[in-house]
Amino acid sequence: MRAEVESYCHSCLRCIQRKTLPTRTAPMSHLQSQGPMDLVCIDFLCLEPDASGQGNILIVTDHFTCYAQAFSTKDQRAPTVAKVLMEKFFVHYGLPRRIHSDQGRDFESRLVGQLLELLGIQKTRTTPYHPQGDAQPERFNRTLLNMLGTLSNVEKQSWSRHIATLVHAYNSTESDATGYSPYRLMFGREARLPVDLAFGLSLDQTSVASHRNYVDRLRKNLASAFEQARLTSGNREQRNKRNYDLKVRIQDLQPGDRVLLKNLGAAARHKLADRWSSQVYIVCKQLPGLPVYQIRPDGKAGPLKNWHRNHLLPLREAVRMPVGD
């Protein structure tokens, strides 16, 4: 009798939707970059509008150096994204090889796509509701929010005026991820700060005989810094992956498998809400080298979607569909 009851519950879609807890089913993976401007990540941060009407911040971070820039905007529309990237980032730092973002409509728009295609920039994206796929901007978002949060109540009313100086302070501070300041990895030298002038601190910037000597020394110093940054960052990533993977129960999916999609967003915030959607999906394929699967609705037409493995729940062969819900 017990076995029959367990079998009944395990094959009941309503029971599965509500009672099955999400688990980690894919090991941690990391974005890889080989040097400055090889991979640039972008994201939007939303705040309360200040006195000038600015209520959004477009975050742009270089993945390898952790160098960041932040630009306040009044909206998140595609023309705003394209204009800021072109006029405030590309013209100052050059063109990156790749740009990585979430699947927001502003970043996935035809206008932004055409701009990147015209400039020869490859576009990659995270899966929905998986911020770990774009972790660097998410970490910087928290840092910037904490810095803005320390402003006085009067200064917070015009927070957009303070972004540039706060971001510069971040870029001039040694990063735990690389062991160097983002500014140094990006430009090959430390930024000269007011504190250096006030206390007469030396930045170890000795004079050089010629431009060629300067370039040679800069190339040598950067090569050494890049190698050390790779080692420090790699060790940190391996440690994080080792700790994360301890709780992972790896379960790969195969084409043709039937799965449920995790309830996310507003629908998941209700206490009585199901943990998994009622729509059954079919796995089409796994993206190369990633725990990301392309799925389609079962039994009806619909667009193909890319979702992270942790958001998919495989169904057994025989699942009883509810008559009415």
Image: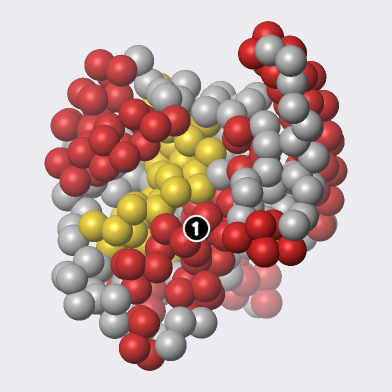
Residue 258 visible? The answer is no
The one nearer the camera, 125 or 196, is: 196
Question: What is the x, y in percent for residue 76?
Answer: 22, 54
Residues packed near mark 1 inside 10 Å, few (<14), some (14 to 19) or many (20 plus): some
Q: Is residue 133 above or below residue 100?
A: below
- Residue 94 appears left or right of 75: right
Question: What is the x, y in percent for residue 70?
Answer: 40, 53
Residue 82 visible? The answer is yes
Q: Which three-letter amino acid code belongs to the residue tagged 1?
A: Val
The one nearer the camera, 315 or 152, is: 152
**Residue 7, picture quadrant:** bottom right
Q: In this view, does 185 lie above or below 174?
A: above
The one nearer the camera, 265 or 299, is: 265
Residue corresponding to mark 1: 167
Question: What is the x, y in percent for residue 15?
Answer: 47, 73
The residue lying at 71 percent from left, 53 percent from top is 175
Counting the numbered discs, the total is 1
**Residue 159, picture quadrant:** bottom left
- Residue 302 appears left or right of 297: left
Q: Is residue 102 above or below residue 173?
A: above
Q: Residue furthest bottom?
A: 153
Question: What is the x, y in percent for residue 183?
Answer: 61, 43
Give the SS element for disc 1: helix
Q: Which residue lies furthest to the top in this view?
A: 212
The one nearer the camera, 95 or 8, is: 95
Q: Please say which color scheme the image uses.
A: secondary structure
Q: The N terminus lies in which quarter of the figure?
A: bottom right
The residue lying at 54 percent from left, 25 percent from top is 38
The residue lying at 68 percent from left, 43 percent from top is 190
